[in-house]
């Protein structure tokens, strides 16, 4: 397994553990300590610290440290001007600025850091307010930090910033229930955002499918909402879409980047990825329990001719059926090395032919309803915007979508049941 793949898997493990902390967010002090150690572990960073900023008396107080000895036992001064600049840099700080801030912090506090080197300083900013700082030393490998590293560190740091602010507010307002709920939802949103960033990193390994996992997550969300799923389950299916191809991390890179159609040996190698994804995801306690199964079964078919387990009909979990269609739709509407993206008429024709054999009729109908509503202007154009191309006269698709709804909304279940019984 190459170094980048190992780094991605290690990072994902940290993010998944972070999700556990969010799901059980009760003791913010413990969450803060755990999150800090996850941050260091995500990139094997030797030393670091988390400091809470206190406007009065204008200082930072260290609440978690590793590898810094006794040098940070007391608070350190932070001027108003310095705090304002850090606040303005915020969570979008660049790698260069993070390095400059580290040098400035070391110069301002030479006595405290006499024998310690700090490479990066990341401001913790929530709602334009400076909450604290994360100080980071070198990586154990000795490698320089990259922009990709900074993206992961920034996402985890935002979680820590929200945790500190949450703890403050809970102290100030006496555990006010509605504020606590908003903060909890904020943590969940950060988890989702971070997993999305990780999904994009997965796709980087396959140069032909960049952006695929994020789009599949969004298509899955659109379909699930159209089917009336509760918000929490919609969030789960979205994350499942983001992570459905995580098993590709163990697929041979030469196969992933093969410029043509796969031969039998290459196809066998590629077919490993659903079960491999299940094995990667299963040991982790996700906020949404069915995510590993959705990764495992997203290449199953209603007629039982899919893989890896040959499930059919109702044996396939509902979420996996949604991800299956979302995955196929994105594959057909984007360029692949062996063909250009297909016209939408051809995509819909494929869905029509394969409803009940490959695709679940209920899922197909939900997709068609969402698509039709966007074309007619009664629904926000999320699906159409994801297609990332200009179409004129989209109304021409309306009759085809309406015909598919007429065909499968009533009779689709019978067809699916027939296919499942074959």
Image (cartoon, helix red, strand yellow):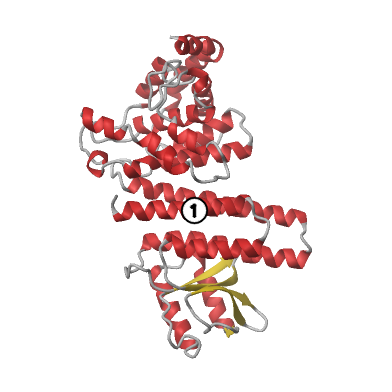
Image location of residue 306, percent across then percent down: 38, 23
In the foreground, 12 or 84: 12
Q: Where, by quadrant of the figure, is residue 386 drawn?
A: top left
- Give the labeled residue for mark 1: 15
Q: Where, by quadrant of the figure, is residue 146 drawn?
A: bottom left
Q: Quadrant of the C terminus?
A: top left
Label 1 sits on a secondary structure element that is: helix
Q: How many marks?
A: 1
Image location of residue 123, percent across then percent down: 52, 71
* 336 relative to 62 in the view: left or right: left
User: Is 210 placed above or below 164 here?
Assistant: above
In the foreground, 122 or 29: 29
* 233 relative to 98 in the view: left or right: right
Image location of residue 130, percent across then percent down: 59, 71
User: Is 231 placed above or below 407 here?
Assistant: below
Residue at 65% x, 55% y is 25
- Tell me the crowding category of disc 1: few under 14, some 14 to 19, or many 20 or more residues within 10 angstroms, Cα based: many
Residue at 23% x, 33% y is 266
* 242 relative to 253 in the view: left or right: right
Residue at 51% x, 25% y is 372
Residue at 48% x, 49% y is 195
Residue sitting at the far bottom: 111
User: Is 321 placed above or below 218 here?
Assistant: above
In the foreground, 231 or 134: 134
Q: Is residue 361 visible?
A: no
User: Is 416 placed above or below 17 here?
Assistant: above
Q: Is residue 30 visible?
A: yes
* 2 relative to 211 in the view: left or right: left
Image location of residue 272, percent across then percent down: 33, 34
């Amino acid at each position: 397994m190459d170094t980048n793949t190992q780094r991605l898997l290690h990072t994902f493990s940290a993010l998944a553990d972070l999700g556990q902390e969010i799901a059980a967010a009760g003791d913010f002090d413990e969450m803060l300590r755990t999150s800090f150690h996850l941050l260091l572990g995500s990139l094997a960073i030797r030393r670091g610290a988390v400091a809470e900023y206190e406007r009065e008396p204008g200082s930072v107080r260290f609440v978690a440290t590793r590898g810094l000895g006794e040098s940070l036992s007391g608070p350190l001064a932070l001027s108003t001007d310095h705090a304002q600049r850090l606040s303005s840099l915020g969570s979008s700080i660049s790698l260069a600025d993070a390095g400059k801030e580290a040098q400035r912090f070391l110069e301002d506090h030479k006595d405290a850091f006499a024998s310690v080197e700090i490479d990066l300083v990341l401001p913790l900013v929530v709602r334009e307010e400076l909450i604290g700082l994360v100080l980071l030393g070198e990586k154990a490998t000795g490698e320089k930090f990259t922009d990709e590293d900074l993206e992961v560190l920034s996402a985890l740091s935002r979680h820590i910033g929200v945790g500190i602010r949450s703890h403050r507010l809970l102290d100030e307002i006496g555990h006010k229930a509605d504020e606590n709920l908003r903060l909890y939802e904020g943590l969940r949103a950060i988890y989702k955002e971070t997993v999305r960033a990780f999904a994009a990193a997965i796709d980087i390994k396959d140069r032909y499918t960049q952006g695929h996992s994020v789009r599949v997550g969004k298509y899955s969300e659109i379909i699930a909402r159209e089917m009336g799923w509760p918000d929490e389950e919609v969030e789960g299916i979205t994350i499942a879409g983001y992570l459905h191809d995580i098993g590709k991390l163990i697929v041979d890179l030469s196969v992933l980047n093969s410029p043509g159609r796969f031969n039998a040996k290459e196809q066998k190698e590629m077919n490993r990825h659903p079960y491999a994804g299940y094995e990667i995801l299963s040991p982790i306690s996700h906020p949404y329990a069915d995510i590993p199964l959705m990764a495992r079964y997203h290449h199953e078919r209603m007629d039982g001719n899919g893989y890896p387990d040959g499930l059919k009909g109702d044996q396939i979990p509902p979420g996996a059926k949604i991800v299956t269609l979302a995955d196929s739709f994105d594959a057909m509407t984007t360029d692949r090395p062996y063909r250009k993206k297909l016209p939408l008429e051809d995509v819909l024709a494929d869905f029509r032919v394969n409803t009940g054999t490959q695709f679940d009729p209920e899922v197909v109908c939900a997709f068609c309803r969402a698509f039709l509503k966007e074309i007619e202007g009664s629904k926000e154009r999320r699906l159409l915007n994801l297609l990332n191309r200009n179409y004129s006269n989209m109304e021409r698709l309306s009759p085809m979508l309406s015909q598919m709804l007429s065909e499968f909304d009533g009779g689709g279940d019978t067809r699916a049941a027939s296919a499942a019984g074959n």
